[in-house]
Image: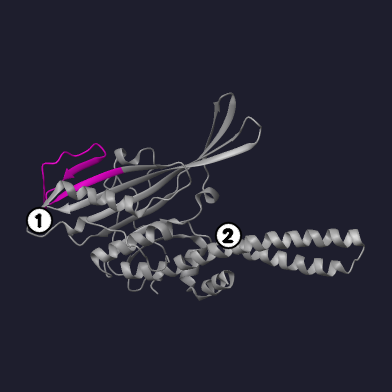
Amino acid sequence: MSVSKAKSFYQELTPQQKHFVDNKTINTTLSLKHWISFLSKASAFDMYADKARTTLAIRIGWLSFLFIASVIASLALEVFYILIATGILGVFLFSTIQARRHFVKTDINNYLRQFFMPFLETIRQKVGDDTKLSASLDFRDPLKVLTPTQSEVTVGGRKRKIQVYEPKLVIAGVTLSDNSYLETVLLDEITKVSYRNANNKSKSKTKTLHRLFIRLSVSKNVYTRNGMTIPPHIEVSESADQYIFKLKHKEKEQVYGILTPAVFFGALSSLYQFLQPLHSTSTEGGTFETPATVPGANRLVEALIWNDVLFNNYDYDSVSRRGSGVEAVNDDSRNIFDS
């Protein structure tokens, strides 16, 4: 059922959604309602496709077993008409392998379902459907599409091969309900270590370092600074009409993992503890809760790119520069990704 459902869901996608599913990258500016509308179907398809791959893998295992058993039986019993069944099993096995390859090819990084969709839904709840969000997304499998930095180290007399992948997953900018402007960059540093143990068996392990950068520009007409001490991982500057906070956060995992939305919104909310509203309104703009459920979970322009105005060398931390800044698009009514 999951296989047919996934195939049906793929056919129901618009050409633009199929393009995203096939390529897994997008760089544009849309209203939040259009982002959610466009990506929720791709996210739902990815969920069905994950289940379909599991089902197909089990089928491939059984068909392979039956195929080999039928070949052995036909030779051992010298009943060669069994080869007819072998041929039929071979056809089914081939078609099943091809079907699984399709779902492997269209697999989207789980950052879409587990991070970006909750991110969109939470922001939408705070600022409304029609607020524009600029984003550059790359949800390809970094272990397949990126060329890693490679090195070797010797531990206990044994060589270990180290491969480091650095995918740039999410770059986004949006105006919040308190008129603050939020810009964020999420990168991962994925380290894969391959080695042979004392029994000369090949082993490997993968670790993830999440790098999160947040730049929050808040209006002096809305907030003033309080007297709290700023920690080292946060920089604060100010212009004539704004306070500008820049936060750098690192999150380590001993596996190949995904940064949770709760970590992101916790880091964002922490910036508001250094502010005091000028009027009687609360700092609602700084309180974020990740929704329990997200719809769909359950050309291209250079919208957001590296720039010294956005993040300085303190923030880069060995990440290479790219591009020339953040630009908002005021009219997305004719954008090809509207659906």
Residue 105 appears left or right of 80: left
46 versus 211 height, above or below: below
- Please give the name of the residue rendered at 34% of the width and 41% of the height, measured from the top-left corner: 316
User: Of 106 and 292, which appears nearest the observer?
Assistant: 292
- Please give the name of the residue rendered at 68% of the width and 61% of the height, measured from the top-left corner: 60
Find residue 221 and name its label: 1
Q: Give the class, few, some or many, for how many residues have Cα within 10 Å of label 1's Cα (few <14, many ≥20).
A: few
Do we see residue 42 in this rendering? Answer: yes
SS at badge 2? helix
Residue at numbered disc 2? 104
SS at badge 1? loop
Image coordinates of residue 228 in percent, x first then y, are 14, 41
* Magenta stretch encompasses residue 230: yes
Give the number of the mark in front: 2 or 1: 2
Image coordinates of residue 310 in percent, x first then y, are 28, 48
Which quadrant of the rendered structure holds the C terminus?
bottom left
Mark 1: amino acid: Asn
Cβ atoms at labels 2 and 1 below 8 Å apart: no
Image coordinates of residue 332 in percent, x first then y, are 32, 70
Do we see residue 323 in this rendering? Answer: no
Q: Give the class, few, some or many, for how many residues have Cα within 10 Å of label 2's Cα (few <14, many ≥20).
A: some
- Please give the name of the residue rendered at 29% of the width and 57% of the height, measured from the top-left corner: 173
User: Of 305 and 286, which appears nearest the observer?
Assistant: 286
Label whose residue precedes the other's in the sequence (2 or 1): 2
213 versus 31 height, above or below: above
Q: Which residues are magenta?
A: 221-248
Label 2, label 1: how far apart the Cα atoms are: 51 Å
Which quadrant of the rendered structure holds the N terminus?
bottom right
